[in-house]
Amino acid sequence: MKRVVVTGLGLITALGTGLEKSWAGIISGKTGIKTIESFDTEDTPVKVAGEVRDFQPEEFGIEKKEIKKLARNTQFAIGAAKMALSDSGLTIDENNAERVGVIISSGIGGMEIFEAQHEVLLNKGPKRLSPFTIPGMIANMASGNVGIYLGAKGPNKSIVTACAAGTHSIGDAFETIKLGKADVMFAGGTEACITKFAVNSFANMKALSTNPDPNTASRPFTIDRDGFVMGEGAGVLVLEELEHALARNAKIYAEVVGYGETCDAHHITAPAVDGAVRAFKMALEESGASVSEVDYINAHGTSTGLNDKNETAAIKEVFGEDARRLNISSTKGATGHVLGGAGGIEGVILAKSIADSIIPPTANYENPDPECDLNYTPNKAEEKEIRVGMSSSLGFGGHNAVIVMKKYK
């Protein structure tokens, strides 16, 4: 089987557009969560979210006339993919386009287009609906448009597995290269659904934090956590077959070595420990790494009661005595929970953490939960070599995805 390495990264989060801007905020323990500006929250119990406020689509070659046709999550995907392409130093042309693919996914897709056009339907009638509604809102269009904007003609798809979609995308892209179906894959996740419909729908499930203080609302693994805080953004990685990367003298952030994917077969929203355990074990088995070699886990860590407790239990079961040795963190305290985009963002963070030998912190960690009693790297980053790192994503529907990366040698 072919070896797969990470050679480019693109990142957009509430902390800023661009890898360096977001990364600086994440490792400093800052949060990008602020009071919602996307819509009037007067009659909404949720007041805060991780909105991206510095993204300019024109800077990424999206023409003004195209902006209205492309959902915000698609615009983020194009921007993050273009940044990843630039970072990788790769050139896509007629000589290699058919060997370059894209798997960039969303959990929901173009929600703001759906909402706006539904209002048109109700107020103005069906004849006034935009002909661009469907190609704007469907979830696969982020991946499809990245293929168009980059000229990448290889395998192209999107995966809709709720909050596991971004990690599934990285894992499937890894497998695509391993099997020889592509030399390069752009992989990750994107999401932009901080809208009145989406936020209130999650709020009515009691899934979101109602803490109005943006500085403390997202607080993974703490005793006083009261739900996740929605974020938006995108994370895209360039995955590349090792010999292909070496032939062009590409810089290498990390090597992707394992992928686990399972289903809880338990409940539509509540996670089960067993499903996460099997995903962690499957990823580790493929990687060839032992539990004693893993130094860091970027956890799903949503700041919800069930997830954080169950994920902690799963880590304990998989790692045994090593569970207390390794560093864990949830970067959702900094970025919010970007739903289908979360795994892409956290895959970028994992690769960058390995390359820079820095463990990012769990922001807002003040009041420990006795049931969450591991080392969550509270509030302050740690300088530490990461031999092997993991990233986990656990989605509604019982979808579990885990990837393993290691330092390239």
Image (cartoon, helix red, strand yellow):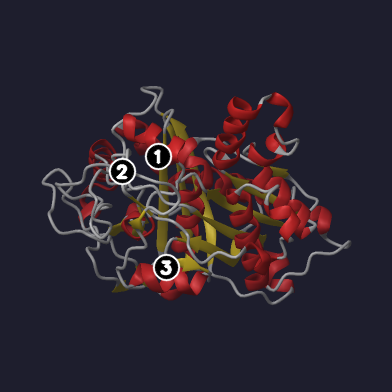
* Front-most of residues 107 and 95: 107
The label shown at residue 353 is 3
Do the residues under discs 2 and 1 have CB atoms within 8 angstroms? yes
Q: x, y (%) of residue 346?
A: 45, 56
Q: Position of residue 162 (x, y in %)?
A: 48, 36
Which of the two labelled residues, at mark 2 and mark 1, occupies the earlier sequence position? 2
**Nearest to N terminus: mark 3 or mark 2:** 2
Residue at image position (41%, 29%) is 398
Q: Which residue is mark 2?
A: 46
Q: Which residue is mark 1?
A: 199
For the view shown, which residue lies furthest in the right direction?
94
Query: Depth-wise, is mark 1 or mark 3 nearer the camera?
Result: 1
Residue 327 is drawn in which quadrant? Answer: bottom left
The secondary element bearing badge 1 is classed as helix
Q: Is mark 3 in CB contact (under 8 Å) with mark 2?
A: no
The crowding category of the residue bearing disc 2, from other C-alpha atoms within 10 Å (few below 14, some 14 to 19, many at least 20), is: many
Residue at image location 52% in from the left, 39% down from the top: 107
Secondary structure beneath dot 3 equals helix
Q: Amino acid at mark 1?
A: Val
Q: For the residue marked with disc 2, what is the amino acid?
A: Val
Q: Position of 234 compared to 44: left or right? A: right
Q: Dots 1 and 3: beta carbons under 8 Å?
A: no
